Image: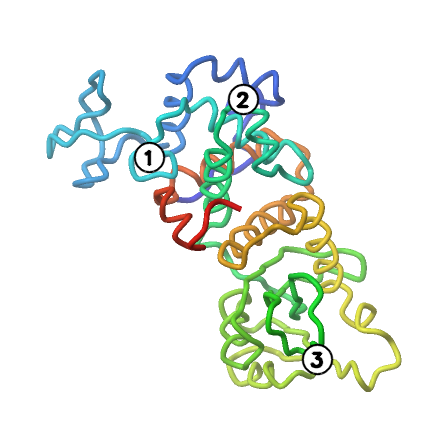
Amino acid sequence: MPSIDAARLRAGVDYPRDRSDLDRFFPEDEACERFLQRLRWPDGFVCPACGHAGAVWRSARGPLCPACRGRTSVTAGTIFEGTRKPLKLWFLTAWEIVGHKYGANAVNVQRMLGVKSYQTAWSWLHKLRRAMVRPDRDRLVGVVEVDEMYVGGQEAGAQGRHTDKKAIVAVAVEVVDEKRLGRLRLRRVADVSGDALQSFVNEAVEPGSSVLTDAWTGYAGLSGVGYDHMVINQSAAADPAHVLMPGAHRVAALLKRWLLGTYQGAVSREHLNYYLDEYTFRFNRRGSRSRGLLFYRLLEQAVQTKHTPTHALYMATGRGPH
């Protein structure tokens, strides 16, 4: 679903301007449902079961499709499906995420919501992270720096790009000019082989763009798959790596600081990609002056993101929430 142009959205009318405005917008769950309905079906109701578009029968138990007689709800098939908590608490969680520069961890959200269960706060944050990146988003264009970084604690005996314990994160960032960076893409990769790195570049960068990398052999085939590949041999250069490729190194430093500051580094490998999605969401919207518009965008994507059962979040790690 295409996003509504921000120029058409009005602060204080289409979305709350600040935290106090949030309470005015959503005094009860019915107001939350009406807001989600406008986001999910901006051009009118569409039946999730049969695709019928247009008029709908209203009932106390939710919309009833006149074509297939199927009953649905505004939360069915979204990240909110099956929730037994008020939607207002979900909205407060979403605001907590976008309302703070560095985000929020589960301990802070649990305290803010006043819920007894840490697991509830943890699972809601993870479900909202799954809504932070659209699968149909545009790829990066222009001049793009690509590099890898490593996430994890100290590793004795590690040399070069080899690692046994750390997670490898591929970084791609648009370079607008010497001082400005554009959009960002991040993804955990299994290794630094050509297959893994070229797959990431193909997913993140539009063919025809100029891709700037170091001389690692994993990037050697980029010219043959439609990219203007520019190679910097860091070992032969007089300047250090952060000078030769400042964009990727700046992103890596900021990402590590964010993971350590907000989550104290307690990020599992199994869920790392979703934390990377959160950081990408923040980085690509760092110029926004409106917390309310970020809130709107997050919920707009949340109603288009498929439901993930809470138990499936735990199964990813084989352990409890962390």
Q: Nearer the viewer, residue 53 or 189?
A: 189
Q: Judge left or right: residue 245 versus residue 93.
A: right
The residue beneath circle 1 is 81
Pair 2/1: label in front: 2
Callout 1 secondary element: loop
Q: Nearer the viewer, residue 61 or 135?
A: 61
Residue 114: mark: 2
Identified by mark 3, the residue type is Gly
Q: The N terminus is located in which quarter?
A: top left
Colour scheme in the image?
A: rainbow
Q: Position of residue 81 (x, y in %)?
A: 33, 35
Label 1 Cα crowd, 10 Å radius (few <14 / some 14-19 / many 20+): some
Question: Real-space Cα distance between discs 3 and 1?
Answer: 46 Å
Seen in the picture, residue 21 relative to 282 is either above or below; the reply is above
Q: Position of residue 256 (x, y in %)?
A: 70, 55
Seen in the picture, residue 251 relative to 321 is either above or below; the reply is below
The residue beneath circle 3 is 160
Identified by mark 1, the residue type is Glu
Determine the residue located farthest toward the right in the rendered image: 238
Q: Judge left or right: residue 161 versus residue 25.
A: right
Q: Is residue 104 visible?
A: yes
Callout 2 secondary element: loop
